[in-house]
Amino acid sequence: MSTCEQCWSDSQGPYGDPVRRYRELVETRKCTPEEQAGPGAGECPRCKRKTLHQYTAEPMCGCPSAFQAPSAEAIEAVRASLEPGDVNG
Ligand SMILES: [Zn+2]
Ligand SMILES: [Zn+2]
């Protein structure tokens, strides 16, 4: 589970342990998916809300992730296309 960006930014400060304070905030607040995803969030392709976490791209809205891990074949195809090959000059 990705961090709640709203609680994380509010937990930073000169007082106490930020990790402990973050846990307290997360448990007591009920942040919206938009707040959890942070100000740099991406748009969820399913519900069209700004709920894709700004660092992990996890859909905080709870929609199934639009991102699927690429297959080994797909990675190999991209890698092959990036190699210079036998271009002369
Ligand atoms: Zn929060
Ligand atoms: Zn969504």
Image (spheres, grey):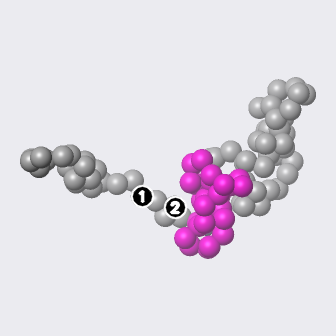
Kind of residue sitting beneath label 1: Gln
What stretch of residues is rendered in magenta?
A: 37-63
From the viewer's perspective, tell me whether residue 80 is left or right of residue 86. Answer: right
Q: Is residue 23 above or below residue 55?
A: above
Q: Is residue 3 visible?
A: yes
Q: Is residue 73 visible?
A: no
Magenta: predominant secondary structure element?
loop
User: Between 83 and 25, which is closer to the camera in this rendering?
Assistant: 83
Q: How many marks?
A: 2
**Which residue is rendered at x = 68% and y = 45% of the image?**
3
Residue 11's spot in the image, x, y percent?
83, 38
Q: SS of the residue at dot 2? A: loop
At which x and y percent is residue 32? 77, 61
Q: Is residue 33 above or below residue 72?
A: below
CA separation in Å, label 2 and label 1: 7 Å
Residue 7 position by quadrant: top right
Q: Name the residue: 87% across, 48% down.
A: 28
Residue 15 located left or right of residue 82: right
Q: Is mark 2 within 8 Å of ligand 2?
A: no
Name the outermost residue toward the right. 15
Element type at marker 1?
loop
Which label is found at residue 39? Answer: none
Seen as rendered, the residue at the extreme front is 89
Tag 1 residue: 68
Q: Nearer the viewer, residue 52 or 85?
A: 85
Name the residue carrying label 2: 65
Do callouts 2 and 1 mark residues in contact (Cβ within 8 Å)? yes
Residue 33: image quadrant is bottom right
Q: Is residue 47 magenta?
A: yes
Residue drawn at x 39%, y 53% as measured from the top left = 69
